Image: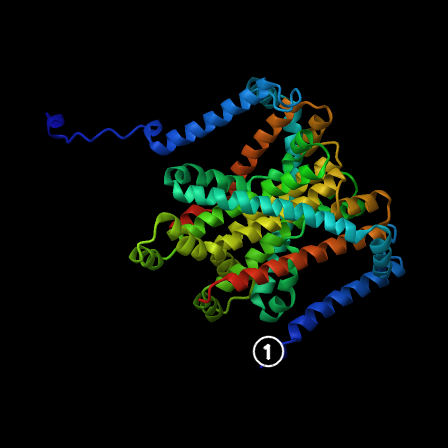
Amino acid sequence: MSSAAALGKRPFAPTVIGLGTLFIFIALVEVLIRIGVINRFIVPMPSQIAMSFGRVITEEDIFGRFRLTFFEALSAGALIALFGVSIGILLYRVNLLRLACETWVAALASAPSVLMYPLFLVIFGRSAMTIIMMGFVAGLPPVILKTLEGLSGTRRVLINVGRTFKLGPSQMFIKILFPSALPTIFVGLRLGLIFTLINVVGVEFLINFGGLGQLINDLAERYDLPGTYAAICFVILVSVCFFIITERVERWLRPVE
Amino acid sequence: MAEAGRVTQPAAPRLWAHPVTQVRIAIILTILVGWEVLAQSGLLYRDVVPSLGKIGLAIVKLLSDPDYYWNLGVTAGEIGVGLAIGGITGLVAGIMLGANRLLRRSFEPYLYYLGPTPKIIFFPIMIMWFGVGPGSKIAMGVISCFFPVALSAAAGMQQIDKVLIRVGHSFRANAWQMAMKIYLPAMRHPIINGVRLGLGVALIGTLLAETKLSNRGIGFLIIQAYSLFDMPRMYAMLIVLFILSIGANAVVGRLGGLHNIRRN
């Protein structure tokens, strides 16, 4: 057995290799900056970035900004849940409408809707409403499509059980269709929330308004390089945590195969 | 005489007579009429919702403006170079991760979790590294499309039929021959899907970077129209851009034979 194959069987080996490579890379960048190979006015030293975390957290009110970004993403998330699931149910119920609109919704999902932000700026002004609406527009299509997919994918045997119990249309929906579609609907909600978060932070950065996105823009405009890198690391950390949490919830909701 | 024995087939129903088409036409008409009523009502500030005539005129003007095509060329070039660099590096990274279990388990989580982060936040760094010119926009395209291509390629490597790999080894194929004759043809479907996803995000990354800081390209034209409050031109540019991006996505899928793969 080769040494790589043997190493691969150890449970902690991949984590150690991954983190080890990351630390070696950071140390290498630190050394290259110190000996002048990399210009320190373009790339700050990782040690400087690490030290500026405390300053960014205290002086730039990072938790207040996080709350604002979270509120915007949550508001947009509530809107996509409300409208996305409702439109998905409507399309499921009215087959003609579904046949007419499903491809449009799919096309909308692949369209670069975030580029409409100047238009939303004109309509809603430079405010949190623009950011929320941009998040809403970006997150809506996957929720509609996945709601439709979940409801259409309900197993025939479950529907037959409902019919055996002589359930009415609303009972059939509440007791059979919706619970059966819930895991797929949550997949759509998760995708929608990811798109929403990406757009919320992105538009905050672009219009220089709001929470974490604006912080990065502010620090970059002040040429505070360690602070800019630290803020970017913080945003990456937040989005990774958000991604992991929603993924865990999705796994928890998914039926055992 | 030969005509006499021919069976007359019923005429195919006209497309517009199909109920789905009728519903689509009804929806489009409702939106257009609602838009025009809103434009004429004066409920919103003047020109926030321009009339359909003004938008139509702006589209005609835009499409007959040579300056627009020059800027479109700049943006297309940036996206193309970004897609090429990000796509090739993503493909190589994906193949490496997919081919080696230890590498995959060590590094794939980083790609998987970094993939959905908002890439536009890296723009200040890209400006520092590559300047305010096209370099930083290309870099945005590269980091945007690297992740979907790498993840699709890594997933594609996992789905390759083991028999094909054994056939390659039986013929004593070297690494290059394995990649060109076995891996890439077998991974065609996930790679095309990755490139389609990559194209979409590279387009967004590049255009957003242009709206933030640039003096050329479609993103710059859009933000310029916003600054001048030339709303019909802005609507026209967004409509044309949406059509172009959806069309480009469809062309990539068709050129890569995605429809044939699905049928098979």
Rendered residue at 49%/44% (across/down):
A86
Q: Position of residue B57 (x, y in %)?
A: 58, 18
- Residue drawn where x is 46% and y is 25% of the image: B29
Image spot of residue A127 (x, y percent)? 72, 36
Residue position marked by numbered label 1 in the rendering = A9
Q: Which one is in front, B43 or B228? A: B43
Tell me what residue is drawn at x 42 percent, y 53 percent. A174
- The quadrant of the picture occupied by the N terminus of chain B is top left
Identify the secondary structure beneath mark 1.
Answer: loop
Q: Position of residue A242 (x, y in %)?
A: 65, 57
Residue at 58% in and 63% down: A248
Q: Quadrant of residue A16?
A: bottom right
Q: Residues within 10 Å of mark 1 (few under 14, many from 20)?
A: few
Q: Is residue B140 left or right of residue A54?
A: left
Q: Is residue A167 left or right of residue A79?
A: left
Q: Nearer the viewer, residue A131 or A50?
A: A131
Where residue A230 appears, as percent x and y from the top left, is 80, 55
Q: As drawn, which residue projects farthest toward the right?
A: A35
The chain letter under disc 1 is: A
Q: Is residue A252 visible?
A: yes
Front-most of residues A170 and A148: A170
Q: Quadrant of residue A34?
A: bottom right
| Closer-to-camera residue (A106/B90) | A106
